[in-house]
Image: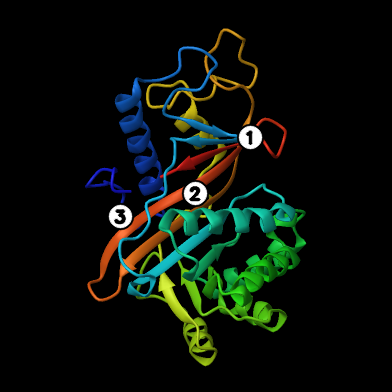
Amino acid sequence: MSSGQAVLRRPTFSKSNVELINSLHSNFDIHVSDEGGSPASSSLPAWVKQEGDDIYIPSWRPTPLSEPRESYDITAKLFYLPGIPSSRRCRHTRDAIELVLKELGVSSIDLLIVSYPGVSFDADDDGEEEASVDEEDSGNSEDEGFEAQIKTWQVLEALHEKGTISQLGLSEFSSTRLERFLPEVKIRPSVDQINVKDCCVVPKTLIMYAKEHNIELLTHNDCTDILPPGTTRELLGPGQQGARIIAAGSDAGDEDAGLKGDIEPQWVIKYTAVVKDRGVIENKGYFAVAQLGTCIEDKASLAQ
């Protein structure tokens, strides 16, 4: 994130992935200019690193924290993306946490917040909130179902019991969702992060329920679908602002530069390390993983 623009201009009150996209663009541009530009053939450029089936765009070197671990509050938010089977989440969760721990040179995270796909919070209408829970379960998508959320949470509970994560949190859960969710889990969330258009308008039912169960309410303006497939292809494609890592389309000819295949974003994790006694952000960034082609092992990692 330190390589990104100092000022990001975006519409007021909009849920946004501008920070992620701008920082990736900036990071790609810096590496392209430093190491000789984009590939002239289907081979990868020098500023990209490949390890087995994993491709790091750009090459990644961890930047460990400079002070002892106890000096920091480390938080992370893991976005499970729409359209990705929940059966992959166990691996995705462990991969995401492992990258953050390696990046910061630590063995634990203080707080991990998870964002489930298809879950949104509307502070203006409690009735719509309750209806959306039923729609979530009655829909045909495995990813948005209640059982899939519980199974995913069990993976997080295992990491908590191991000491890798100190506290767990949810995103976009109304009081109705929390009432269903809490009885089904062993380790209850300590944080509920919600998006509201007006930060002063939070349903009283949610405030009372959170207070009763010792859940801290936080706000955010993140996109639920933080990295759509079209955006990912633009980031890595041959366009004017693209990194020119993948070819123009999955059916591109042999003469077209770049990797061939469809691109499918898998997950995104955002992390922040704050020095406690000074309130200074020492390290902040994102990792995003996308799968290229039809094989789950073929994936490209976007590191920032």
The residues bearing labels 2 and 3 have C-alpha atoms spaced at a distance of: 18 Å
Image quarter in which the C terminus is found = top left
Q: In terms of depth relative to the viewer, which is nearer, 57 or 198?
A: 57
Relative to 71, say whether 12 is above or below: above
The residue shown at (30%, 48%) is 10
> Residue 111, image x and y in percent?
48, 71
The residues bearing labels 3 and 1 have C-alpha atoms spaced at a distance of: 40 Å
Number of residues whose C-alpha sits closer than 10 Å to that of mark 2, classed few (under 14), some (14–19) or many (20 or more): many
| Disc number placed over residue 53 in the picture, else none | 1
Q: Which residue is mark 3?
A: 12
| Disc 2 secondary structure class | loop
Number of residues whose C-alpha sits closer than 10 Å to that of mark 3, classed few (under 14), some (14–19) or many (20 or more): few
Relative to 20, say whether 220 is above or below: below
The residue shown at (42%, 27%) is 242
Q: Amino acid at mark 2?
A: Ile
Q: Does 151 sit left or right of 290 as displayed?
A: right
Q: Which residue is mark 2?
A: 226
Q: Amino acid at mark 3?
A: Thr
